[in-house]
Image: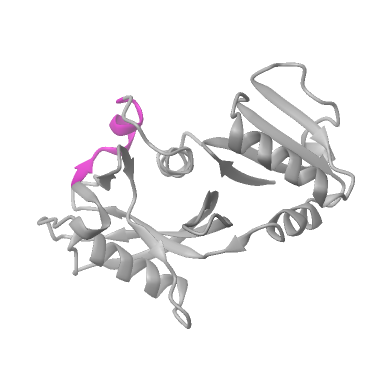
Amino acid sequence: MYKIYINGTPLFLAHTSETGGAPSSATEAMAAPYHGNPRMLLNYIDMLEKNPRFGSLTLYCEAPEQLFNDFSSLYRIVEAAGGVVYNAEGQALLIYRRGYWDLPKGKVDKGESHEAAALREVEEETGLSALELGPFIGLTYHTYHDNKGRRVLKPTYWYRMFTTQTVLVPQAEEDIEKAEWWDARSFLGSGAEVYGNIRTLLEMEVGKG
């Protein structure tokens, strides 16, 4: 199953067996079959972009990989990478920008590995240089429109990282107002504004996902 955030709403691309095969009647969740027509996908994408009234939308079929490929073909793909960084006390590093808490991440440069990009972006956005790269922990997807109005799908590759460094320097030119250490479980219960894909990742990290 694929989970993609469109305008804050999770879109699930699933196998029929993962949904029970029947559309939901609940207004907060919607499910519908996919019959191989990308034009139908555009209708659902447009609906979620303009009127995100559903808690979630699930599209299902017998070949979810093909469904994902059809969905991806409607977007420009921009890969990114980032990190969930822990200090010696086990606290996770979060950054605050444009009204939301986030994790440090950024675009993968041409010829750059996901691991190298994740380390570079964390260093640039937080000022941390003494980073130890840990395991790959997940892949998230979200969409947006670029400055030319094109639809972009951003797959972000996430790695666990560790540091003993304590001084944080938020990257102001990227609109990062602050960088802080948080207990991840406490953060999730704080009511702080956070993007859905970031919340999902942190829930996985604390064992709630």
Quadrant assignment, res 75: bottom right
Q: Residue 178: where, in percent of width, then height? A: 18, 46
Do we see residue 171 in this rendering?
no
| Residue 148 x, y percent position in the rendering | 51, 59
Q: Residue at x 30, y 25 (%)?
A: 190
Q: Position of residue 121 (x, y in %)?
A: 32, 65
Report the side of 35 relative to 164 (left or right): right
Q: Residue furthest left?
A: 167
**Extreme residue in the bottom direction:** 111
Q: Position of residue 32 (x, y in %)?
A: 81, 33
Residue at point 19% right, 69% down?
129
Residue 184 visible here: yes
Whether residue 185 is in magenta: the answer is yes
Judge left or right: residue 208 versus residue 25: left
Q: 21 or 7: nearer the eye?
A: 7
* Residue span colored magenta: 179-190
Q: Is residue 131 above or below residue 86?
A: below
* Way the structure is coloured: one colour
Residue closest to the far right: 35
Residue drawn at point x = 19 percent, y = 46 percent: 177
Residue located 43% across and 63% down the image: 81
Q: Is residue 165 magenta?
A: no
The answer to whether 23 appears left or right of 45 in the picture is right
**Seen in the image, is 31 located left or right of residue 92?**
right
Q: How many marks overall?
A: 0
Q: Considering only vertical position in the picture, is 177 above or below 192?
A: below
Residue that extends furthest to the top in the rendered view of this protein: 26
Q: Residue 116 sits in which quadrant?
A: bottom left
